[in-house]
Amino acid sequence: METGLALTPSYYYWEEHTEETVNDFQGLEWKQYVGDFRVLEPVELPEGVCCGVQYTTFAINPVRYMYYLLERCRELGVVTVRKEASSLEECFGEDVDAVVNCTGMGARTLAGDKKVYPIKGQTVLVRGECRAVKFRKAKSGWQDAVLRRPGEGTILGVSKDEDDWYDMTIREHFTQADGNRSDNVDPDLTEVILERCKELAPELLVNGKFDVIRSQVGRRPARKGGICIEIKRVNVGGRERIICHHYGHGGTG
Ligand SMILES: Cc1cc2nc3c(=O)[nH]c(=O)nc-3n(C[C@H](O)[C@H](O)[C@H](O)COP(=O)(O)OP(=O)(O)OC[C@H]3O[C@@H](n4cnc5c(N)ncnc54)[C@H](O)[C@@H]3O)c2cc1C
C-alpha cells in the first residue's frame, strides 16, 4: 500500500533575521532531525532573501499516510470503532483500561480545556508534484509554503488566522482531520497565494499559471500554553483507569 511519504529536498528562506536564524541558526531546533542540513551561500539565495538553509526531509500526504497507518494497525489485529463521543468516560466501556485523548479541538468539550482554540489556514492544491519543498518567511510575518503532497499534487499556502471560530459554534471539534472544507474559502486570498508561490515552484506553471485543483480551509487545533501531554488516573465503573491526554498541536501536527 502507498505510504504517502517521499524524501524530498527542502529549502527555507528568510527575508530578515529572526530568533531562528541568528547565531548560526541555533534557534532552528529541528535542524538536528533532518538530513543533509546546510546553510546556503549568498549566491544561492533568491532576490529579497537574507539567508536560507537546505535539507532533506519527508514530505507527507497526511490523508494517505493516516490510511496506511490504519491499515497496518488493522493487519496487526487492532479493532476500530468510529463514533462521536460525548465524554471520555464513555470511551472506556467495560473492559478498556486506558483511553488516549487525541481529539484536537474536541478537547475543549471532552477535557473541558478552554485553552484550546482554532487557527484557520487556507491552502490551494495544484496539479503536479514540486521538485522541492520550500518556505519563505516574509518581513511582514507571512510565510509562503510550497509543500509536496506525494501521489496527489502540491499544496500552496498558507494563511494563519488565530481564533477564527466560523462554523465552530455548530461543531466545536470540527478540524482539519475531518477533511478540508471548500466553504469559507476567501477567493482573493487564493489569488494572493497563487501569485506569491509562483517564484517558489516555477516548474509547476503551465503558461505562467498553476493548474488549480481546489482551494481549502482547515483549522489547526492549537492550545494557549502549548501542547497538553498528561496522564490522569480516573475512577470509572468502580475501578481505576487511565486517560492520556495528547492534544494542542496547532500547526505542527
Ligand atoms: C492549513 C493547515 C496546514 C497545516 N500544515 C501542516 C504542516 O505542514 N505540517 C504539520 O506538521 N502540521 C500541519 N498542520 C497542522 C496539523 O494538521 C495538526 O497539527 C494536526 O492535524 C493535529 O492532529 P491531532 O490529531 O492533534 O488533531 P486533529 O487532526 O484535529 O484530530 C482530532 C480528531 O478527533 C476527532 N474528535 C474530536 N472530538 C471528538 C469526539 N467528541 N468524538 C469523536 N471524535 C472526536 C476529530 O473528528 C478529529 O478526527 C496544518 C493544519 C492546517 C489547518
Image (tube, grey):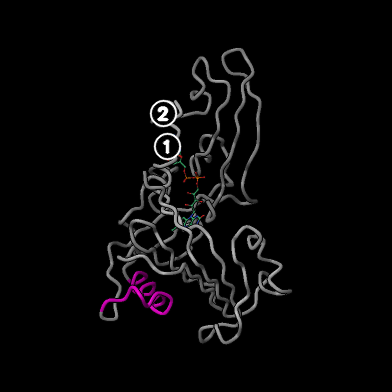
Quarter in which the N terminus is drawn: top left
Element assignment for label 2? loop
Residue 16 found in image quarter:
bottom right
Q: Amino acid at mark 2?
A: Thr
Dominant SS in magenta: helix
Q: Which residue lies at the image location 43% right of the left edge and 68% below the top edge?
A: 146
Residue 205 is inside the magenta segment: yes
Image coordinates of residue 46 in percent, x first then y, are 51, 83
Image coordinates of residue 11 in percent, x first then y, are 53, 71
Above or below, comparing residue 92 to residue 148 in the picture: above
Image coordinates of residue 233 in percent, x first then y, are 66, 25
Q: Which residue lies at the image location 33% right of the left edge and 57% below the top edge?
A: 152
Residue that label 1 marks: 70
> How many numbered badges does the structure rendering display?
2
Nearer to us in this view, 216 or 198: 198
Image coordinates of residue 163 in percent, x first then y, are 50, 56
Q: Amino acid at mark 1?
A: Leu
Contact, CB < 8 Å: mark 1 with mark 2? yes
Give the residue at the far top of this rendering.
238
Nearer to us in this view, 140 or 155: 155
Give the residue at the far right of this rendering.
23
Residue 38 found in image quarter:
bottom right
Residue 189 is inside the magenta segment: yes
Q: Count residues near mark 2 (Cα–Cα under 10 Å), then give few for <14, some for 14-19, many for 20+.
A: few
The magenta region covers 188-206
- Disc 1 C-beta below 8 A from ligand 1: no
Element assignment for label 1? helix
Tag of residue 166: none
Dot placed on the residue nearer the N-terminal end, 1 or 2: 1
Residue that label 2 marks: 80
